[in-house]
Amino acid sequence: MTMKRQSLVFVVAAALAAPGCATIHWRGGAAPKAGTHTYRDKAHNAYQDAMNAMDAHDWKVALTRLRNVKDHFPYSKYAALAEVRIADALYGQDKFLEAADAYARFAKVRPGNPDAPYAAYRTGVAYMRQAPSTFFLFPPAYEKDLSDVRKAIAALQDFLDSYPGSKYRPKAKALLKTAQDRLIDHEMYVAHFYRRHRKWRGMAWRLEGVLKKYPGQGYDARAKVGLAEAYLHYDKPRVADARKLLGEVLEDHPSPSVEARAKALEKDLPAVKTAAATPAAKADAKAPATKAPAAQQAGTKAAAAKQAATKAAPKADGDADAKGADKAPSAPTAAAGAGGS
């Protein structure tokens, strides 16, 4: 019995000492097939090394390690994880356009991946970070090129449409409003530029766009007052449209400054309306006189005939002759009335 026990111990020890068996990773369920767990473990270890660098904000090292995971372990789940983390590493280096492209590509190529909503949301975030800064020492952001803000708006809107149940939805909505406000500020700035140069149609076009694309964003009152002013300065003033816009503004009780401007423009409405009618009045005055209607002409002739008959009739001594003279013009008058009818 002693020899048998010693032999059993020797066999077990030899098995444990065999290559690849000293450490076995059991990840739940059945054990991995021979020859496959090593690949998976290497991918996991490589990805974990990259994440350690990410946690230390060593973006360059992390980026190198993540690309290594993607290139050397393309058939592991860590390849997909590495792709979205590569975008994070680029973002960490302030390479926002490259990050936005990487996020967008991941969301497009892997729409079913659990990280797809995150990547779609971060696309908009990266574009917003690339947009002009609002730092107080720099010119206002709305005076600069806002093409990246437009891209951010498109990306965030696409995210909200595609992932209605995402946990990133509240943040995306808040960022979308920030982006839209910045774009509206730009449109209002351009409209004011047109106002200074008295380019009323250009001003109106910008403000109409604000009211159509971004209603309820807090700019309606200012945009409507500006649009009313532009309408009143057209070659043919749109007085009715201006009056309607100003009425809507005053009903909504805007800020004191906007309300004062709206009331000032409203006072000018009658003057503008009269001025608009002046050319037509002048045209009527210059038009050739038209002939009077036939009934009016007949009445005039009857009156003249009556006056002539009165002068020509002999002076009568009796009342009958006088009465007969008075009735003499009645026949032409009756005839004229029939002709007019």
Image (tube, helix red, strand yellow):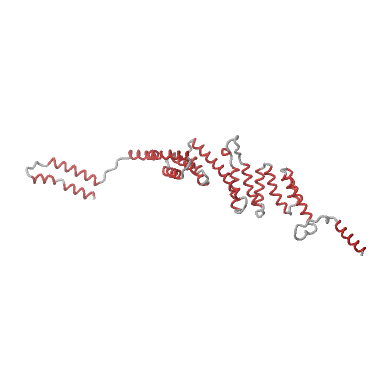
293 vs 257, left or right, is: left
Q: Going 68% across and 46% down the picture, which residue do you hit?
A: 88
The x, y position of residue 156, in whole percent, is 60, 48
The x, y position of residue 62, in whole percent, is 73, 45
Instruction: Say which quarter of the image contains residue 302.
Output: top left
Residue 200 showing in the rendered view: no
Q: Quadrant of the N terminus?
A: bottom right
172 vs 11, left or right, is: left
Residue 218 showing in the rendered view: yes
Instruction: Say which quarter of the image contains residue 14.
Output: bottom right
Which residue is at the far right?
3
The x, y position of residue 155, in whole percent, is 61, 48
Front residue of this view, candidates 247 and 132:
247
Instruction: Say which quarter of the image contains residue 136.
Output: top right
Q: Going 72% across and 54% down the picture, which residue do you hit?
A: 77
Q: Going 85% across and 55% down the picture, which residue do you hit?
A: 19
4 in relation to 302, above or below: below
Which residue is at the far left?
317
The x, y position of residue 311, in whole percent, is 13, 40
Q: Going 89% across and 62% down the picture, which residue do you hit?
A: 8
